[in-house]
Amino acid sequence: LADLPPTTCLAFFEEEANKTKKIFKAIAAKGKACECAPDDKNTLVMWLAKGFNASKKKIRKSTIELIIDRAGTDYDRLRTEYEKVVAYAGDRDEITDDDVYAVTSEDIEAKIFDMLDAMCARDKALVLEKYYSLTVNNAHPLYILAMIRIQFRTLLHVSELYEEGMNKYDIAKRLKKKEFIVERAIRNTRHFSAQKLEMILEQIADTDMKSKRGLIDPQIGIEMMLTQFTE
């Protein structure tokens, strides 16, 4: 590093950097170390609000948050959804939640959390409806099962950290999760004890194992599992 020619631009990318290591200190001394963290939800809300204002559209903050909850935090994806909503509203001055639901598409994480919300409400029919909406998009049952496992594991981790007194921002940073996912997880933690979540994770692992060994059909196995979760 000390002998790099002035014409060279060398960049190091790490998911997580240890600031106590010699290599980090050497890089920081010769160049610049910066954290490229994703923007928080408030920043995304303000960014979208500017766009709607430029389009001369009125929209509530909660409706903007709904767009983020459904589309995620990727700026390109949010720009696409914003353009769809504005086009759908046409000459109307105000954009409503109904407009967002009509034209935006949810990412799979959001759909899984919708399924969790339905489980909390013990709404068996809605749980299965949400599951079928995922299969309609050609998502393989075992992929859906893996995503369900990830979200329940996230729910368990969020529950544990929230019990320790951490706020949603610190939890999101610790778990490297989107802020809106942590918000929804916190809201759902009151419906599941840690023991219940661990039991659910065991059932998911059992369904996964039996499906991969050909002991049960994955589609039927997941349907039965989801039905049990709402009892």
Image: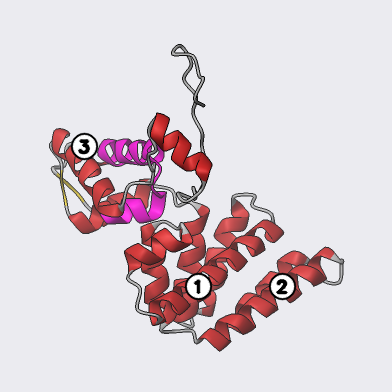
Which mark lies nearer to you, 3 or 2? 2
Cα distance between the residues tagged 3 and 2: 44 Å
Where residue 205 is drawn, which disc sits there? Answer: 2
Whether residue 177 is situated above or below residue 6 in the rendered picture? below
Which quarter of the figure has residue 82? top left
Extreme residue in the top direction: 7
Q: Is residue 11 magenta?
A: no
Q: Which residue is mark 3?
A: 51
Secondary structure mainly formed by the magenta segment: helix
Q: What is the magenta range?
A: 65-88
Query: Which callout, 3 or 2, points at the residue further toward the start of the chain?
Result: 3
Q: Residue 1: horizontal and vertical position, in percent? A: 51, 26
Does the residue at mark 3 contact the one at mark 2 (Cβ under 8 Å)?
Answer: no
Q: Is residue 207 left or right of residue 134?
A: right
Q: Regarding mark 1 in the picture, which secondary structure is present there?
A: helix
Q: Residue 176: horizontal and vertical position, in percent? A: 46, 57
Q: Which residue is mark 1?
A: 157
Q: Residue 186: horizontal and vertical position, in percent? A: 38, 74
Which quarter of the figure has residue 133? bottom right
Residue at 72% across / 65% down in the picture?
A: 219
Residues packed near mark 3 inside 10 Å, few (<14), some (14 to 19) or many (20 plus)? some
Whether residue 3 is situated above or below residue 62 in the rendered picture? above
Q: Is residue 75 magenta?
A: yes
Q: Residue 6: horizontal and vertical position, in percent? A: 44, 13
Q: How many marks?
A: 3
Identified by mark 2, the residue type is: Ala
Which mark lies nearer to you, 1 or 2? 1
Whether residue 127 is situated above or below residue 122 in the rendered picture? above
Residues packed near mark 1 inside 10 Å, few (<14), some (14 to 19) or many (20 plus)? some
